[in-house]
Amino acid sequence: MAIKKPENMTFEATLEELDSIVEQLENGDLALEDSLKHFERGISLAREGQTKLTQAEQRVSILLEKDDTSPLSDFQNEHLREE
């Protein structure tokens, strides 16, 4: 099975895989090279998870800033692409 890129995974799937990697690393049963590969994957997952959380936070902030008379807008194009 091909490994998905973190940016193509849901936040929940990212957390699930990250949790599994942490568990494997904590067990200490992996060879050094495998541990490094798992650690590298974990860092990628953690960074992407943080990005997804930041985007969600931005969406919530935008929703809270607007009043009831403001027109709805597309988050992806208008706000999240500004990064």
Image (spheres, grey):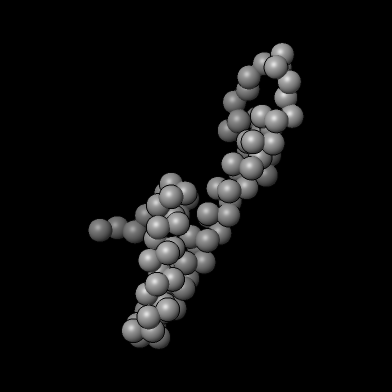
**Quadrant where the C terminus is found in the figure:** top right
80 sits to left or right of 2: right
Up/down of 75 relative to 69, above or below: below
**Residue 70 x, y percent position in the rendering:** 71, 17
**Residue 28 x, y percent position in the rendering:** 38, 84
Which residue occupies 59% across, 26% down?
A: 74
Up/down of 16 relative to 58, above or below: below
Up/down of 58 relative to 65, above or below: below
Q: Nearer the viewer, residue 63 or 10?
A: 63
Which residue occupies 35% across, 82% down?
A: 30
Which residue occupies 47% across, 67% down?
A: 42
**Residue 38 x, y percent position in the rendering:** 41, 72
Whether residue 77 is visible here, answered yes or no, is no
Which residue occupies 59% across, 41% down?
A: 56
The number of numbered badges drawn on the structure is 0
- Residue farthest toward the top in the current orientation of the protein: 69
